[in-house]
Amino acid sequence: MNANAQFIQDLVTFPAKTNAIPKMLYESAEIYELEMERLFYGPHWHPVAHVGEIPAAGDYKTFYIGEVPILITRLEGGGVGVFHNACSHRGTMLVPDVRGNAAEFQCPYHRWLFDNGGNLRGVPGENDFPEDFCKADFGLRKVRYEVFAGLVFATLDDHAAPLSEQLGEIAAPLAASLGGDGRLRLLGYQKVVYNANWKTYRDQDGYHPPLLHAAFKMLNWQGGKGECTISENGNIALVSQLAAVRNTEFLKDPSLVEFKGVDPSQGSYVVCPSLVSFGSKHLDMFNFRFGIPRGPLKTEVHWAYFCHEDDDEEMIRHRLRQSSNMLGPSGLVSLEDAAVFHRIQNALKAGTPDAYFLKGVRKDADPYKSGQNDEIANIVWWEWYRKAMGFGRAAA
């Protein structure tokens, strides 16, 4: 452990009560840097793409794990490649575009040429290189990955446990939120940068939706009888119960909230072991939110919307209209979130030095099983976070 990491660990002590969190964790640049090392570059898996975003050979997508740029490609044989998005020569970012299709990638600096499998194919001036230079030694650095239900997970730590161990109890509901078989096709994105720490964004809970979001009240979506399963590493699988829509008069087009699936009362909301990404299935929407920390005070989120490969044109149009209007940074049922994240971040120095989770936190409560509208799941994740970061806890 380096001296700076030891200093930060000594600086932070969690309160004795497990439901209290020091607010300083949401704004410290030093803590953010340690989070990069311990969490984002540590032995943990991060969703970086869905195969529906790169359906054809040569398709690619760029993304980040923490602050490390990566490149995800679809290979000729149908497989996937995941690499550091940096030329193996001098480290120049190789691909600046978000998505595209290319058989090869050329570094603009010295024109080194790589195929979409990461192999170095062309090098100008090679005759003047050292005698032992070999192209096979200078392919793009590979990133370890696994695919689950079409979702591509990656880790920067070669010693991370298999993905199945980190998914645990959320595997089944995660697959359900991805259409069951993961055979999805990308409809499009909505992207936003929140002026908030990534943990402020991740701290979302089941307590707030019927209280904060006006559309939940208008649509009679208070629910309350769903069930939340939490893993020891803080992964959350919430299978929610939504009451039938009783009022659509405030909508010019009520078909927006029509349900064409099997059971309109069932929704799912899954927080993956990426620390900051979410999958959800409500009404007929397949949505996955890919989160990227952009410093201690900013979080970038890509809301990706999908249809199923077997959908007809009518269903595709329905999913597209429903997704783009109901979710996302300005969606009918989620537009208030950004304002609240911003207010939380602006008020960190006001009031008490700690934030508290209270809903569902009772003596007889099981922290690994909670109700739909509780906060207790957050406590499990924060305890995992505390241990992973090496922070102590005050004596009772």
Image: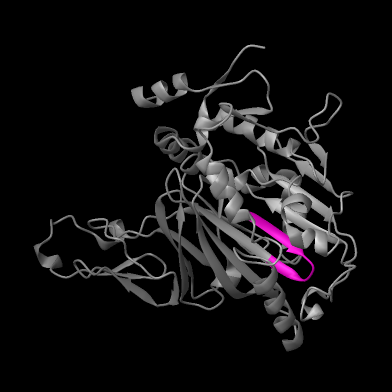
Q: How many marks?
A: 0
Residue 45, can we see it? no
For residue 61, side relative to residue 286 (left or right): left
On the image, the x and y values in percent for residue 29 come to 40, 37
For residue 354, side relative to residue 366 (left or right): left
On the image, the x and y values in percent for residue 55 come to 56, 76
Q: Residue furthest top?
A: 395
For residue 340, side relative to residue 113 (left or right): right
Seen from the viewer's position, the closer of residues 358 and 56 is: 358
Q: Is residue 27 magenta?
A: no
Residue 170, can we see it? yes
Please say if 153 is above or below 382.
below
Residues shaded magenta:
278-286
On the image, the x and y values in percent for residue 201 come to 58, 48
Residue at 70% x, 33% y: name it.
357
**The N terminus lies in quadrant:** top left
Q: Main secondary structure of the magenta part?
A: strand
- Residue 377: quadrant of the picture: top right
**The C terminus lies in quadrant:** top right
